[in-house]
Amino acid sequence: HTLDDIKKLGPDADSAFRLLVLQSHYRSSPNYTQKALENARNSLLELRKFAQLQHQPNLIVEWDKHGTIQKESIDELREELLGLLTDDLRTPQFLAKINQAHSQIRSDKLGSKEAFDALRGLIRFIDQSLGLKLLDEKDLTKEQKDLVALEDTLWKEAKKISGSGESYDFSKIDELKDKLASDYGIIVSNYIGQEGLIWSRYSIPGDS
């Protein structure tokens, strides 16, 4: 591949190419096809969504101490990740562990502020280890936070009305979701009964 092929990946092409290299063990022969480059860019987007969790205290669900993830589990994950790096730079397994943890954290949430602080430390550790500029992921602006808060309010209203057996008009929520997606590239994960909204920015900063 030429440098122009890599630049086609967009404004974060250097990080996408770096991730492509990290997805294979350093002793193996990576597959540098255009498709592999595009897949690496998509994987980078997922890692950035993981990094965005550092700005989302809504992950903390303190009333549920059993179903949520505690600080000790995140500390153990960090030790596992460090072990994979010190054991012959097993970066493919390192990345697989992160993806698994990302899904679990979004699903199970965190049980305390200490767990949230540990998560933020974990994200810094991952960024320092991989050099993928994950800490460049910024928090939402005040305007964006206000829109997400409004969607949270509407979902709580929907839960209350639906719980009483009445029907709820979801058109306001749909309109708000469309605005967040089209204007800011932000999607919000929620459904009736879930505690707290978790957002994702699904484009790399600088994309057109």
Image (spheres, rainbow, N blue to C red):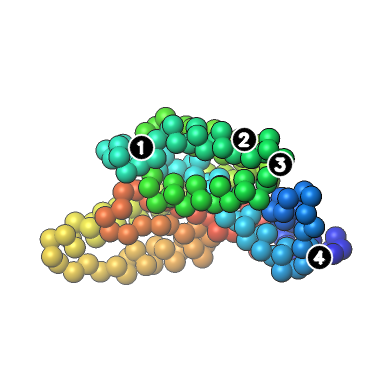
Distance from Cα at disc 1 to Cα at disc 4: 44 Å
Q: Residues within 10 Å of mark 3 (few under 14, many from 20)?
A: some
Name the spot of residue 188 as percent of width and height, x first.
Answer: 43, 57
Distance from Cα at disc 1 to Cα at disc 2: 24 Å
Q: Residue at 62% x, 45% y: name it.
A: 94
**N-terminal label among 2 and 4:** 4
- Is residue 141 something one can see in this rendering? no
Q: Give the residue at mark 2.
A: 82
Q: Is residue 27 left or right of residue 80?
A: right
Q: Give the residue at mark 3.
A: 89
**N-terminal label among 3 and 1:** 3
Per the image, label 3 sits on a secondary structure element best described as: loop
Question: Of the residues tagged 1 and 4, which is closer to the observer?
Answer: 1
Amino acid at circle 4:
Asp
Distance from Cα at disc 3 to Cα at disc 2: 9 Å
Q: Residue at 54% x, 51% y: name it.
A: 99
Which residue is outermost to the top? Answer: 114
* C-beta proximity under 8 Å, tags 1 and 4: no
**N-terminal label among 1 and 2:** 2
Question: Of the residues tagged 3 and 1, which is closer to the observer?
Answer: 3
Q: Which label belongs to residue 5? A: 4
Q: Give the residue at mark 1.
A: 111
Looking at this view, is 144 or 32 the one in front?
Answer: 32
Q: Is residue 82 left or right of residue 59?
A: right
Name the spot of residue 3 as percent of width and height, x first.
Answer: 85, 60
Looking at this view, is 92 or 20 the one in front?
Answer: 92
* C-beta proximity under 8 Å, tags 2 and 4: no
Q: Quadrant of the N terminus?
A: bottom right
Distance from Cα at disc 2 to Cα at disc 4: 33 Å
Which residue is outermost to the left? Answer: 164
Per the image, label 2 sits on a secondary structure element best described as: helix
The image shows residue 34, relative to residue 126, as above or below, that is: below
